[in-house]
Amino acid sequence: MTLVSTIIPTHNRCDVLAEAIESVLAQSVDDHEIIVVDDNSTDDTKDVVSRYPVLYLHVVCGKPSMTRNAGIRASTGEYIAFLDDDDVWLPNRLRPALNRLQADPEAVMIYAQMQVTDWTLTERRCVYPQLPLPEGHPVREFLETVISCDALLIRRSVLDTIGMFDETIWGAEDMDFTVRLARAGKCLALQECVSMCRVPSDAGIDAAKPIIGGTSKWVSRHQDDTSLLEKHFSVADAYQPTLSERRRILRKRNGWFVDQLLEHAAMAKRANLAAERRAALQAAIIISPIHCLKNPRYWRLLLSK
């Protein structure tokens, strides 16, 4: 058995995939396999991967959950990590997390912060979750703030208890997965940032591609997210949120979706896609009127031409 398996799911991201692979190869863990799971890319992904000492796996899935699961099934590592194809790990991301997890046999996973950037990895927007990161069974916190898969390192044996990613979910499978991990066993945390996450913008990519029809995807993801929250709220265990905690979690999650839709509306405005901008604003006000009405950005986008 390999010590660590890192799974990189990808689809048509040959322009940034090399950076992701190189950031994993730079880690100071020798017994380490890297699996690039290509979900039927039509660009030069296979050629990019061929330059590196990694395992290439071609699949036809259509969902991030299915692509990650294909990588898990092909892996041999005692510990499993993930990195999205458009993100990069920071130097020495893996070794401190691995050392802590190996030192605590009761722990099933360890997580950390990630930094959100623009497409060029130069504009720092925010780091999340905010410190301090809780340990133990942080179910409530994981329901409130989604933990990036880029910042996870899990013990393979926990999958025998919780299973893999839910392939029926699109967009909220990471939240569901981390909450199940938190319920299954002890969680550790590194109080630092370990990865950088690109967020699509009009810098460095075709601005129209991630915008047209994007509002409907955010609405669908919000519906999945809300359904999953209700499912996890109903689990009768020691980590079940109280009624007031449930309301607070729902408000915060709704506010997060409003922020994403307003960013989407701003991108649509820059791309001169008026119909998409209006659709995003309408979706935002339906999800949470209070977050919209209190947000000056909503009013600027609503009243702009």
Image: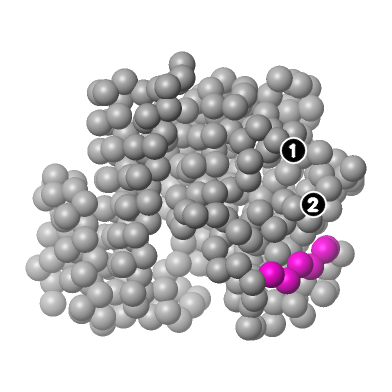
Mark 2 or mark 1, earlier in chain? 2
Dots 2, 1 in contact, CB < 8 A? yes
Picture coordinates of residue 282 (x, y %)?
17, 63
Mark yes or no: residue 66 visible: yes
Which region is colored magenta? 54-59
Mark yes or no: residue 121 visible: no
Which amino acid type is shown beneath numbered disc 2? Ser
Left or right: 118 in relation to 90: left
Mark 1: which secondary structure? helix
Residue at numbered disc 1: 156
The front one of 162 and 68 is 162
Label 2 neighbour load within 10 Å: few <14, some 14-19, many 20+: many
Left or right: 256 in relation to 121: left
Residue 56 within the magenta-colored segment of the rendering: yes
Residue at numbered disc 2: 75
The secondary structure that dominates the magenta segment is strand
Which amino acid type is shown beneath numbered disc 1? Arg
Q: Which residue is drawn at the image coordinates 21% and 57% (left, top)?
A: 284
Residue at the outermost top position: 238
